[in-house]
Every structure is written in C-alpha cells, then in structure tokens.
Image: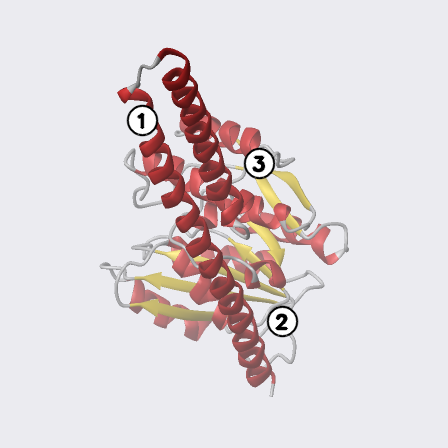
Amino acid sequence: MIGTIDAPHIDVSVLVPAKDEAENLPLFLELCEAAFRDGPAVYEVIVVDDGSKDDTPAVLIALQAKYPFLRTVRHRSQRGIADGLRSGYLASRGDIMVFYPADLQFKPEDIPRLVAPILAGESDMVTGYKQGVYEKAFVSGIYNGLSRSLFNVPVRDLNNVKAYRREIMDAQPVRPDWHRFMIVLAHAQGYTVTEIPVPLYPRNAGKSKFGLSRIPIGVLDMISVWFELRFGQKPLLAFGMLGAALFAVGLLAGLVAVILLFTQGVGQRSVWTVIQTCLILGSIFFSTGIIGEQIAVLRAEQRELRRTVDEQRREGKGR
C-alpha cells in the first residue's frame, strides 16, 4: 500500500538526495509506485533537491501532483549527501529510513527487500551488496577493505543503499561525508547490521558526481571516524598517554644525564635538548587532552539537546 500525506502512520521513508536528476526522477517515481503498491508497509518518498541547476525543481512539482506519496525538500545550494539525508530525515515521518539514489543504478523494486528484515525484527540496519559490473570496483574494494580492517564490521559493502531504524539516524553526527560510515557508527553503538545482494544497473541518465578527488578525503574521514570511536568520548586517553610517554622519556633522559655528570663529569647537551623537548611536548599533549575532555562534555550535551529537539519536532508533526 502506498502512503499519502494524510496517512496517520508511515512505516518507511525513502530518502532520495538528488542533484541534477531531472531525467531520472520520472522513471524513478514510476518504479516506486509499482514497488510499493502491493506491500503491507506504508511508504513515503522524500526527494531532497540538493541545489540542482537543471529542471529538477519543476519536474518535482509536476511529479507531486501525480504521486501523493512524494514529498520534496530543496537546498538552495549544493550541500552534499550527508546534509541531504539529514534534511530528508527531519522532514520524514517513517519508523524506517531508506537511503536510495535517484540515478536508477539501483531499482526501487529492491527497496522492500531491504526493509523486510527490519520490519520482521531481524535486524536494525540492512545494507545492499552490489551485484553487477561496478566502474569504481577497485576504489570501492580498497575503501571497504580498509574499513573492515579498522572497524571489524561484518559486511562487505559499507557505502551502498541501506535501510535502518529511525533511531540510528538520531545518533548520527552531522558531519560532511560521514554518511559513508553510518554502518560503522551504528555497529559501534550496538545495532545489528546485515546485508543482502542488490543488483547494480548502468546509470539511466546524467553522470556520476564521484571524482578521484574524493579518495584522499575518504581516507582522512576514515581516520577521523576511527579516532572518534576510539577516543572521541575520552580524548585524554589518547593525548594523556602521549604526554605521559614523553614525560617518561624526558625523565629517563634526565636520569642518564645526571648519572653521566656525576660519574664522568661530562654534561650531554643533546640529552638536555631531549629533556626540554619532551617536557614541552608532554605539557602540550596533556593540555590538549584536557581541552578535548571539555569539548567532549559539550558535544554530549549538544547530542542530548539535538535528540530532545528532534523528538519534540516529531511530536509536533504527529498532532
């Protein structure tokens, strides 16, 4: 059954970030209507126009008149997929979110398969595993291999179409490009994650927004996520250990210098340089850790405030 705007309850919200997808959206929505028609769940589709320069806004206005389950959000300028998912989530009403691109490399007919394990209570998050020829398979393989080695997540494809419980999005950091690590972050928070094979098709129209410049950014984001999971809540553990190690090296070097001075009557200028360097760097690391602890407290309070605001917003929509 397809949900309408007046439906009292929406089961699934399909979030579709779209940048210059005017050629793809009519067929995408037509396939959505066919995919959702006979299922037990009530769906809505939220297309987030991410600052499109083509006819996407006009196309969406026409499609809204044709498909009651379609809702739209517009960014005046391009803000990226992570912001698009966030905007769609804030506008959504479903208990389950689905991230799905509009380029038709993945067909809407597979959305119910992604959602089914969550509706059945078998999983909190389901990701698709690409089946077919993928142009960026080499880059994707490196990314997924590094991610699995760093984060020990039990899926093969971390950056693909996915379905997840609403509360998973509640806890996601609002950071550019961190949507790629949604599975990693959810798994670290104790949510169950599974994967199913999803066919990959050639892009229907338009061109890919992915470029090779995204590779170094992705690697740096991966390191950032790793640090967040390891030390984000307790940054003093990282910087304090470094500071303590430097202080220990400085102390050991000082003892060696004193022993040499008393036994041989010779001072070692290089040793005193090491001592000074270690004491200065150790102090800097300790200070950084203490400041990081204060920031971590503020971040925790901000997350709780954001969660409260989101809950109040949803309650307001339900009235």
- According to the image, label 2 marks what residue? 10
Relative to 19, does residue 146 appear above or below in the rendering?
Answer: above
Residue at image position (52%, 66%) is 303
Upstream in sequence: badge 2 or badge 3: 2
Quarter-wise, where is residue 156 in the image? top right
Q: Residue furthest left?
A: 53
The answer to whether the residue labelled 2 contacts the one labelled 3, judged by CB atoms less than 8 Å apart, is no
| Count of picture labels | 3
Q: Which residue is mark 1?
A: 272
Foreground pick, 261 / 120 = 261
Disc number placed over residue 151 in the picture, else none: 3
Residue 202 location, quadrant:
top left
Task: Provide the secondary structure element on which disc 1 rests.
Answer: helix
Three-letter residue code for mark 1: Trp
Q: Amino acid at mark 3?
A: Phe
> Residue 164 location, x and y as percent?
61, 55
Residue at position x 34%, y 54% from top? 80
Could you give the CA–CA distance between mark 1 and mark 3, rounded to whole angstroms?
A: 41 Å
